Image (cartoon, rainbow, N blue to C red):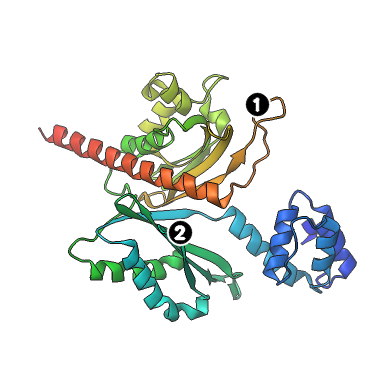
Amino acid sequence: MKKFGFDNLLVSDREIFDALYSQKQKLPDEKLLALCKNIGIFLSTNESRESICQYISTQFKDWHSLKTILDNLNYNEKSKKTSSLLISGASLADFKEVIKDIAPQFSDNQMSHKGVGVNKYEVNLTTSTLERSNTRLIQKPLTDQSISVEQNGNDIVFRYDSDEVLDPIVNKIIEKVAGAKHQTFKKQEITLSNILLSEYRTSFFLNLIVMDDKKYSLHDVKRIKVHHNSKNSVMDLDPNDLEPSKDSGFLKTAHLSGSSLHTNKLYQGLRALGHYITEITWTVEESKNNRLIEINAGFNNPKECTRFFYDIKGTYKKNIKGENYTTERHKILDTEKAEFLKFFDKFLYLTYDQIVTEYDNQLVKDDE
């Protein structure tokens, strides 16, 4: 409560104005405009910060109401992760028909749906969950969720926010389409639960970060999480842990300089203990726009390597001299994100098929 400058639950217009106006880092103008939109005030992006804060300050009389909306905005901004399914044997029209059919069942979730161009269909809705504290149940703020169905070549990519509260809706859509197209329908999702050797689980991520495309080249690995099954523990490794030298991290070195990952002492130690990578954050250099794109991918269930997710964290521009990239992260435009995800999903499933094939071939060799 005090981080925004409020000492009491009941606050004056001036206290709210001062607190919002001064928090330029935590509450940039874009977030304040989103807050206004959330409460039914639509302002121009050219509106001054002072004017925006004045509008907001007149709408709230207590800290709790304002904090609820701010928490919701922060959740949407920081916690949004995406999961996907690759579908064959069904068309975009099949999904449209099912979505239109079940939408009335989720009227409480304010479900809406629309076509985006000729190859994409979107569903938007709101959800809320209950969180149990020591003394009571607390309802979390309403959260905007989305589902998209996109034609990608001969397949359908079914993307949705990686949140368990969406599972019943996602499952219902998939089951109804599968039932109607049971003779041809096939569903593929990213899971390494059947891959029991830790080195192959790690190799999946190492192959994923090296984009097989001239447009995107690996720039840096920022952070990884490794898991140990018997201890059921997760360990974070930052760039300081990943660097055997000052020039590059061991993950990047293993791929770009031709050196072997298996000779790295850190990796040898982790592998000997049974650790494997379950989440990774990295940046790729986009040659077209001369910028970096930061990506995060991993498993929500690290022990079983299920419930895979990915997220485009943002972009980094070059400084004025054009020599180095700045440390300020920018939000990627929706149109740019859609274009990147189309490429990423295709590469993701190719990488997955490759590691599954390699693992299966290794099992055959071991049996001979």
Identified at 36% across, 38% down, the residue is 204
- Check residue 324 in the rendering and tell me which mark sits there, or answer none: 1
Identified at 51% across, 80% down, the residue is 108
Could you tell me which quadrant the C terminus lies in? top left
Query: Is 196 drawn above or below residue 243 in the view shown?
Result: below
User: Which image quadrant for residue 150?
Assistant: bottom left
Q: Is residue 143 left or right of residue 32?
A: left
Is disc 1 placed on a helix, strand or loop?
loop
Q: How many marks?
A: 2
Q: Is residue 332 left or right of residue 162?
A: right
Q: Earlier in the sequence, mark 1 or mark 2?
A: 2
User: Which image quadrant for residue 352?
Assistant: top left
Judge depth for marks 1 and 2 and give the one in front: 2
Identified at 40% across, 74% down, the residue is 100
The type of residue carrying mark 2 is Gly
Separation (CA) of disc 1 from disc 2: 37 Å
On the image, the x and y values in percent for residue 344 come to: 42, 43
Residue nearest the observer in this picture, 363 or 297: 297
Query: Is 314 drawn above or below residue 362 in the view shown?
Result: below
- Check residue 117 in the rendering and tell me which mark sits there, or answer none: 2
Judge the density around disc 2: few (<14), some (14-19), many (≥20) Cα neighbours within 10 Å.
Answer: few
User: Which image quadrant for residue 292?
Assistant: top right
On the image, the x and y values in percent for residue 274 come to: 36, 37
Residue nearest the observer in this picture, 270 or 321: 321
Q: Is residue 247 left or right of residue 231?
A: right
Is residue 175 at least partly visible in the picture?
yes
